[in-house]
Amino acid sequence: MRVLLLTAGALVGFAANSLLTRAALGTAQIDAASFTLVRLLSGAVVLTLLARVRPRASTEGGSWTSALALAGYAIFFTLAYRRIGAGVGALVLFGTVQITMIGTGLVRGERPAPIDWAGLALALAGLLALTLPGASAPDAMGICLMAVAGIGWGAYSLAGRTSRDPLGATAGNFVRATAGGALFVAASVPGLHATPGGLGLAAASGSVASGVGYALWYAVLPAIPAWRASVVQLTVPVLTALVAGVLLDEAITVRLAVATVLVAAGVWLTVAPALHRG
């Protein structure tokens, strides 16, 4: 039950990140670089405070390798959301994450069951249905940028599977990753701009959706195989697309609906058997 609750909390945070980022960038309330820096900085502040006020001291402080993956993900994630919608972006992001994590898990010796492969095939079919060329196909550059972000997030998630202190590790990673955000800002001058609303959305994304959400995710990762962690994340695009249709007035096209159904079916096939294996 504890793993289930932590996982649910983390997945809600992931969906909120897509919605907050798209809300800020889609309405040009803030530029991509400023959003990324504020997001990473606010996450670092909140996580560091949480790590210091808890009863026990931190036993991990993150690593530069994980921070590099986190910063790369955050930068390309933000750039992608200037060009594509929240629902589409989440589907591409977590589809790429799935491929990255499952591929790495296979190399490391994890062997999913046949029903899990069937689930993977359905989920990848959903991603393919979304990205095939056509009149309603999303922006190609946005898709590529989000795919790179997915590789970064997959690498960051894999690094978290060895964590013994999720909060301390996540705090340290965010502190280090702010250096990447600062370099992104320096490279984006003079195109920087921000409104109070944009700054607020970036801070909410960093402090709650990213900071707390990622700490919860690092707490879950050691308890589940890499392939299952990757597939479970594909529930996020379903939630994101539905909420984006309501809050951000994004169109739920037939293509997106088909992709979402296939992905959801793939996740169900992968996760449901686990309930019967104990």
Image (cartoon, rainbow, N blue to C red):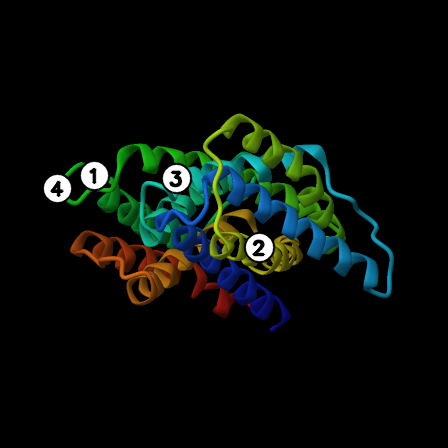
**Residue receiving disc 4:** 135
- Give yes or no for contact between labels 3 and 4 (Cβ–Cβ under 8 Å): no
**Residue receiving disc 3:** 80
Q: Between label 3 and label 4, give the one nearer the viewer.
A: 3
Of callouts 2 and 3, the N-terminal one: 3
- Residue 203 disc label: 2
Q: Between label 3 and label 1, give the one nearer the viewer.
A: 3
Q: Nearer the viewer, residue 72 or 83?
A: 83
Q: How much space separates mark 2 and mark 4, taking CA atoms?
A: 36 Å
**Residue receiving disc 1:** 132
Of callouts 3 and 4, the N-terminal one: 3
Q: Secondary structure at mark 4?
A: loop
Q: Quadrant of residue 5?
A: bottom right
Kind of residue indicated by mark 4: Ala
Residue at the top extreme of this rendering:
187
Mark 4 nearby-residue class (10 Å; few <14, some 14–19, many ≥20): few
